[in-house]
Image: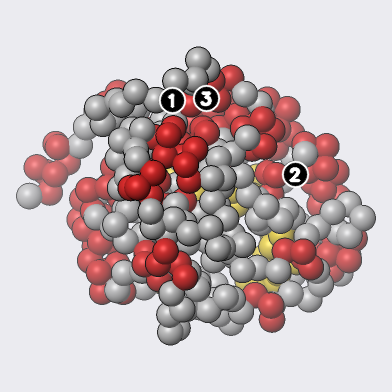
Amino acid sequence: MLIEQVVQVSPVSELIEEPVRFEPRPRSESPIDPLQDCQNWTWQQVTSRAVTDPSTLASLLGISNASLTSVTQENAFGLRIPHTFIARMQQGNPADPLLLQVLNQREEQQIREKFSTDPLHEHTGSPCPGLIHKYSGRVLLTVASACPINCRYCFRRHFPYEDNRLTPSTWQPALNYIRQNPSIQEVILSGGEPLMLKDSVLDTLLEEIETIDHVQLVRIHTRFPVAVPQRLTDPLIDRLSTMRMPVTIVLHTNHPNEINNTLIQALAKLRSSPVTLLNQSVILKGINDCPEILNRLSRKLFSAGVLPYYLHVLDKVQGAAHFSIDDSDARQLHQALVDQLPGYLVPSLVREIPGQAAKTRL
Ligand SMILES: *Cc1c(COP(=O)(O)O)cnc(C)c1O
């Protein structure tokens, strides 16, 4: 049984191919195709030109406006999708697994019991603005308020970023807190999106962190390179490669279709640097809650130089209930990966429980 499953694993060359696309439909009449063109944009251009209205989205995907009728605009956390991410969606498919991660559907408006606006009680773990100290030995800096992409299941979708955004003029209290706590060995840049920071600002922040002797590790939690591979610029990679302490980047990828050749090429530059690349995923109903998809994701990540790290069950954030699956289903899904994959390709199945100093294994 096991041997059969191992033999069925595709060779690496097959794993790095573009996802199979639906029958292409003609796109808009415009002479410039933004989905092709976006590959040549800078990351700032991709970010500022993100699609925020459903009819543009529908026309780029070659689907009728009517197939997006579930979209609602009454949400402060609006539709926001960069062209580079849309380019990986299947043309003509309103149920595309990448589209469903970022499409604001009517279900979001339902107020559901046990789903809250602060599922992780992060307002209680913050000793000063922009710093969350809930894990032992580690702190999170929420360094940027926005993201280039609004994922609908985001557990910080209601986070009061305005009060917690770190800038060079406001980050001293957070840095002092780290300086005064020798137990803090790791600083995790989180968000929003830490890579929303301009390179010069990020550089200054990293310099400050490097001066704190007891900080031995730096980590960046980011979905930015997945949404916009252009963000992995040579200067950024050089900066991370020359930090005095080991740097880890934890990417966030949920579906194998997110890993296209553009992303693989961008990650190739990081692979030849000292930076460690890990990935975390969230189990999302109707998107990746199936062993075959998660199996393919793990293998594709590995062939791009990224190790699967965490598989999260959904944080119960208000507006994301339609992505939720039962714990027993999550365990079954994880067991299937254990049965099918080498151990180093099986992410840990975890849940975030408010008040716990570490994640809880399911
Ligand atoms: C879990 C988590 C961390 C800490 O991760 P560990 O790898 O368990 O130390 C940091 N940031 C976010 C957003 C997390 O979910």
Q: Where, quadrant-wise, is the C terminus in this rendering? A: bottom left
Give left or right: position of 97 versus 174. left
Residue toward you, 88 or 315:
88
Of the numbered discs 3 and 1, the one sitting upstream in the chain is 1
Can residue 356 be seen?
no
Please, is residue 333 above or below residue 24 in the view? below
Badge 2 is on which residue?
Answer: 197
**Label of residue 28 in the image:** 1
Give the mark, 2 or 1, whose residue is nearer the N terminus: 1
Tell me the residue at 78%/60% (across/down).
165
Q: Is residue 119 above or below residue 17?
A: below
The colour scheme is secondary structure
- Residue at the (81%, 72%) spot, across then down: 128
Q: Pointers 2 and 3 in contact (CB under 8 A)?
A: no
Residue sitting at x 26%, y 74%: 328
Identify the secondary structure beneath mark 3: helix
Specify the amino acid type for callout 1.
Ser
Q: Quadrant of residue 361?
A: bottom left
Which quarter of the figure has residue 25? Answer: top left
Q: Which residue is mark 3?
A: 34
The amino acid type of the residue labelled 3 equals Pro
Looking at the image, tell me whether mark 2 or mark 3 is earlier in sequence order: 3
Check whether the beta carbons of the residues at disc 3 and disc 1 lie within 8 A of each other: no
Position of residue 309 in the picture relative to residue 174 (left or right) = left
Q: What is the x, y in percent for residue 335?
A: 24, 62
User: Dot 1: what SS?
Assistant: loop
Q: Judge whether 263 appears above or below 76 on screen.
A: above
